[in-house]
Amino acid sequence: MSIQETPSANRLHIAIYGRRNAGKSSLMNALTGQQTAVVSEIAGTTTDLVKKAMEVRGLGACVLIDTAGFDDEGELGSLRMQKTRESIAQAEIAILVLSTEENEEEWSLEEQWNKDLQQAGVRTVLVLNQVDKGFDTSKIAKIKERFGVCPLPVSARTGEGIPELLEALVKAMPEGNKEQTILGNLVKAGDLVMLVMPQDAEAPKGRLILPQVQTIRELLDRKCISMNVTPETMEGALAALKKAPDLIVTDSQVFAQVYEKTPKESRLTSFSVLFAAYKGDAKVFREGAEVIDQLGENAKILIAEACTHAPLTEDIGRVKIPALLRKRLGEGVQIDVRGGVDFPKNLAQYDLIVHCGGCMFHRKYLLSRIESAKRAGVPITNYGILIAKLSGILDRVTLPESSE
């Protein structure tokens, strides 16, 4: 897959924060080399998150996020600041922008945001922008005294300091971004892996879904032998093989059907289970699935999807999993379905959260949701792991270790 085709979920997310007119949008344009964000002398021009995918030498595939100023005002300003605040969950690196035109007395907001970013585990690069306008150089020492780090002097207009900023971003890159794999320790070079992929109404016409494509690519990179089948052709494929596959990866919705056909010598898992570890925490999801034994018809369950697609007749999150839950717990169980970034703030109202594989989210964002569930005291699980539990085969399913 070329860098232009790298999914957003696999890109390093770098967010730019600062006051209105601190030059955030200009800085984003300087980094991308394009007029990505609208620049204006009018404060508050950036009204929503502006994202730009790009390639940065040393960082690889990235998504730059331009945010609204965190000093915005008024009712609409409050909504914009809320979007800016929510973006912290997406950010893996933050560029915190101070302007040479700001006075030291105005830095309390920046100090608070710096603390909030650090508490959220976001690596922060401090920048003093608009140095081309001239400024008292003693301001750099004052910033270092206040923030504990020396800011990088830059000018988005002239390009001064931009190469040094790119170097700082490379140094701030989280180590985990370099090591994550989908299949973890489940395969080695030469292993035979069978992928069972239903081609039903839920499958996109003429193409495969993202987890399937990414898994196939990783198998090729790791010098494994992959065989792609549907549930209907699985038996014929097994009969044609001289030995049983080392690993069988299936779509979770046909877990029970594939389990019945899986040779005893083969390990069994699903794409969603693989992504439970690749994007989240398989151990936490396993513990969450076990809670289903304690729930009854009065349970309230949240189903969270990363996608915002239109529901289909065979939709796994909106049709199949709710049907399985009602079959196990009773028709009275209350089920809420949320898609995309629409994730409730009041999680304590739920008895269980069931999350999709998260292929459209990057790892930090999904982990932030897991942490939110922990803080609310609500167990959380994953589509594939829950389906295995409801199908009575969870003990037979191979759970990969989390990537970190």
Image (cartoon, helix red, strand yellow):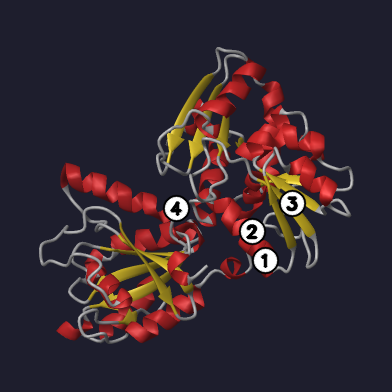
What separation in Å lies between label 3 and label 4 (alpha carbons)? 35 Å
Which one is earlier in the sequence, the residue at label 3 or at label 1? 3
Badge 1, how many Cα within 10 Å: few under 14, some, many 20+?
Answer: few
Residue contact between numbered discs 2 and 1, judged by CB atoms under 8 Å: yes
Could you say which disc has been placed on residue 194 in the image?
Answer: 3
Q: Position of residue 36 (x, y in %)?
A: 25, 67
Query: Amino acid type of disc 2?
Result: Ile
Q: CA distance from mark 3 to mark 2?
A: 10 Å
Q: Residue 313: x, y in percent?
A: 49, 28
| Residue at 78% across, 33% down | 393
Distance between mark 4 and mark 2 Cα atoms:
29 Å
User: Is tag 4's residue or tag 1's residue first in the polypeptide sequence?
Assistant: 4
Contact between labelled residues 4 and 3, with CB atoms less than 8 Å apart: no
Kind of residue indicated by mark 4 = Ala
Q: Secondary structure at mark 3?
A: strand
Q: Amino acid at mark 1?
A: Leu
Q: Nearer the viewer, residue 365 or 146?
A: 365
Task: List x then y, in percent, for residue 12.
Answer: 47, 65
Spatial CA distance of label 2 from label 1 is 6 Å
Which of the two marks, 3 or 4, is nearer to us in this view? 3
Q: Amino acid at mark 3?
A: Met
Mark 1 sits on what residue?
Answer: 220
Which secondary structure, mark 1?
A: helix
355 w.r.t. 25: above or below:
above
- Give the CA separation, mark 3 to mark 1: 13 Å
